Every structure is written in structure tokens, then in C-alpha cells.
Image (spheres, rainbow, N blue to C red):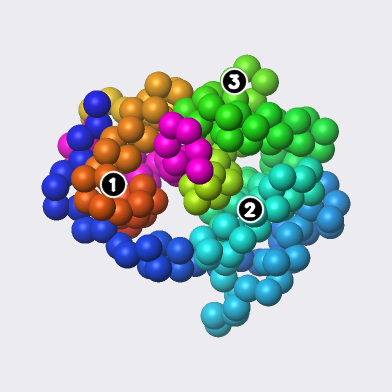
Amino acid sequence: MIVLPDDVDLPDRDTVLGQAIPFDRARWIPLLPDPTWWPTALDECPHEGRWPRVDRRAVFGIARQADTTEGRRHLLVAALVWGTGTRAQSVNRRARIFGHSTPEDIDAQLGEALDVLRAQGAADAYRAFNNEQRLPYLGPAFFTKVLYFAGHDRATVPYRPVILDSVVVRALKANGAVDPGWPENGWTTDQYRLYADGVHEYAQARGVLPDQVEAALFFRGKQRP
């Protein structure tokens, strides 16, 4: 059981939804299977300095169209863009998924996982991504972002999906919320279920949404070496 400390400083929901990441459209387009995979809604994101910035609110908007094949493709790309930043090395690493799986394989796993999310909930959807047929280079840190944007603000059973990545785990370890032996990546479905259970119980006790707890852990993890 994951136990979170009582003194976690929780951001309000507007702060969570406004968490924005810069991106470079020109670096992404050549790495996609074709330009139609690019969600045009990203072209409407505001600039801050040199780069446009996409926030969680914008990705949630893209996720509302995830009931079609094109919409699921756009959700995947938007989640990758939001989680990556502008460095060429990071973009190239994230985009390796498109060079190692066919569009048909990507479509099939996205469709299956999001169907499972709606019917059975976040932990089973996690398993649908994290099985023997998993897409190369699409690991938990990013497919939990896909699940989060697809399901956090929709009715799901038994609970809303939340993001799990190495930064969140760093905060969990620092706060004694998980065993020091917890891996930095590659979490099992049972570990994700434990994490999600803990986040939801804590959110319910504090009267907030689960992503406010996840964001608080992320912000804490970013502050640690």
C-alpha cells in the first residue's frame, strides 16, 4: 500500500491544467508516419519566447476526439509532445516508436487499450499497453500519459488513470511513500495499481482530483537531484 505524507502541497486544478511544455513542430513532423498524424490543434498553442507551449488543457481537448483512429493518433502524438520538450535528442528518442512499429500496430494497441480503459479501468488498460505485444519504445512513462488524457476527465472504472514516470517515483521515494527498491521505470501492472490506489485515496481524503496529487509529486520530484 502506498502511503503519501500529510504535508503534500497540492496545486489547484487550474495550475495543473496550465502545466505547459515548449515544443518544436519542425522536429516532429519528419519523424511521424505522415503529416496527418500531427494534431492541428497544437498549431494554435500560444508562443512564449521562441517556442509554442502546449499545456494539459490543450491535450485534454485533443483527447476528446480519441473515439476515432485519427483522434487516437493525435492523442498519442500530443501526449508525446507534451512530455518531451524541444531538445532534438529527446524528440528523436520519443519518436522511435514510429520507426519500430507500423501504423496498423500502433492503431491496434491504442484502440485496444482505450477500449479496455473505458470498460475495465486504468489498471487493466495499463496491462493492455504493458504486455508481450507492447509497442517498442512506448513505455509506461508515456503510455500512462495517453491513458491519463484519454480517461482522467471521463467516467472510468474503477478509478481515473494517472501518470506514473520516473520524476513521480523520485518524489514517492523521497517522501517514503514507496519502498526504496521501487524501480525507476518498467513498473508492473500491480505496482501501477498500488500507485493509483494510493493517489486516489489521498485525493479523496484531501477533497481534490487525482491529477492534483500526481502533479504535486511531479513538481516535488523535479526539485530533487
Magenta span: predominant SS is: loop
Q: Relative to the observer, which residue lies in front, 61 or 29? A: 61
Q: Residues within 10 Å of mark 3 (few under 14, many from 20)?
A: few
Residue under circle 1? 203
**Pointer 3 residue:** 131
Q: Which labelled disc corresponds to residue 127?
A: none
Give the foreground label among 3 and 2: 2
Q: Which residues are magenta?
A: 155-178
Q: CA distance from mark 3 to mark 2?
A: 23 Å
Q: Nearer the viewer, mark 1 or mark 3?
A: 1
Q: Which mark is residue 63?
A: 2
Left or right: 196 as drawn, with respect to 71 = left
Q: Residue at x 33, y 32 (%)?
A: 197
**Relative to 50, does residue 70 appear above or below in the rendering?**
above
Task: Return the x and y of residue 225 as percentages of the image width and height.
Answer: 28, 51
Q: SS at mark 1?
A: helix
Q: CA distance from mark 1 to mark 2?
A: 23 Å
Q: Amino acid at mark 3?
A: Asn
Task: Left or right? Give the position of 163 relative to 197.
Answer: right
Residue at image position (39%, 51%) is 211
Is 217 positioned to the left or the right of 83 in the image? Answer: left
For residue 64, what is the image quadrant? Answer: bottom right
Q: Are marks 3 and 2 in contact (CB under 8 Å)?
A: no
Q: Earlier in the sequence, mark 3 or mark 2?
A: 2
- What's the amino acid at mark 2? Ala
Which is nearer the N-term, disc 1 or disc 2?
Answer: 2
Answer few, some or many: residues within 10 Å of disc 2's Cα (few below 14, many 20 plus, some between 14 and 19): many
Considering only vertical position in the picture, is 204 above or below 11? above
Per the image, is 15 magenta? Answer: no
